[in-house]
Image (cartoon, rainbow, N blue to C red):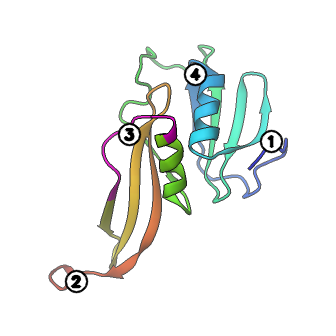
Amino acid sequence: MGEAAEAPPRSGWPRLMVELHMSDLDRSLRFWRNLLGFGVAFSRPGFVYLERIEGAQVMLCQRHGRFETGPMETPYGRGALFQVYVHNLAVVADALSARAWPLYGDIREVWRRWGDREGGQRELFVQDPDGYLVMVAEHIGERALPQEDAP
């Protein structure tokens, strides 16, 4: 996604949305756009609404003291993990590598039980400039449960 469309998100409004409060909105915006591949749906002073073509959405807001229910100390978002699903994880990994942005652990492939089957994904974890932890993942398929785990 290129420049700001200044319109509601193309994939519609989500039923659950997160707004992250940033210590430096411009720096955070560069991370979310240039490294994670988000585009601007719309913005206003001190606020930007971002989306990816796959439908992931996040709001970034310059900290202003309102809605802060406790001390804001870095890393922000302790205990929270934000998941972003993309079509091509390599594009994000390459962008992070090109800027020498540190990963939180190694890129990995995992298979997790999804009820009556397993779902696989390649994933990486990275912290944004304020320390919010983001998992970026690419689905790699589904498979039957191993026989010993089958219902």
The residue identified by callout 3 is 103
* Amino acid type of the residue tagged 3 in the rendering: Leu
Whichever of labels 3 and 2 marks the residue nearer the N terminus, that label is 3
Image-based side of 111 in relation to 101, left or right = left
SS assignment at label 4: loop
Q: From which residue to which does the magenta span run?
A: 98-108
Q: Residues within 10 Å of mark 1 (few under 14, many from 20)?
A: few
* Location of residue 110 in the rendering, given as x and y in whole percent from the top left corner: 31, 63
Distance CA(mark 4)–CA(mark 2) = 46 Å
Residue at the image position 65 percent from the left and 26 percent from the top: 61
Residue at the image position 73 percent from the left and 56 percent from the top: 12
Image-based side of 31 in relation to 70, left or right = right
**Front position in the image: 98 or 119:** 98
The residue identified by callout 4 is 67
Residue at the image position 57 percent from the left and 23 percent from the top: 22
Q: Which mark is residue 3?
A: 1
Q: Residues within 10 Å of mark 2 (few under 14, many from 20)?
A: few
* Amino acid type of the residue tagged 1 in the rendering: Glu
The residue lying furthest to the right in this view is 6
Foreground disc of the pair 3, 2? 3
The residue identified by callout 2 is 150
* Amino acid type of the residue tagged 4 in the rendering: Phe
* Amino acid type of the residue tagged 2 in the rendering: Ala
SS assignment at label 1: loop
Foreground disc of the pair 4, 2? 2
Distance CA(mark 1)–CA(mark 4) = 29 Å
Magenta run includes residue 107: yes
Residue at the image position 34 percent from the left and 81 percent from the top: 143
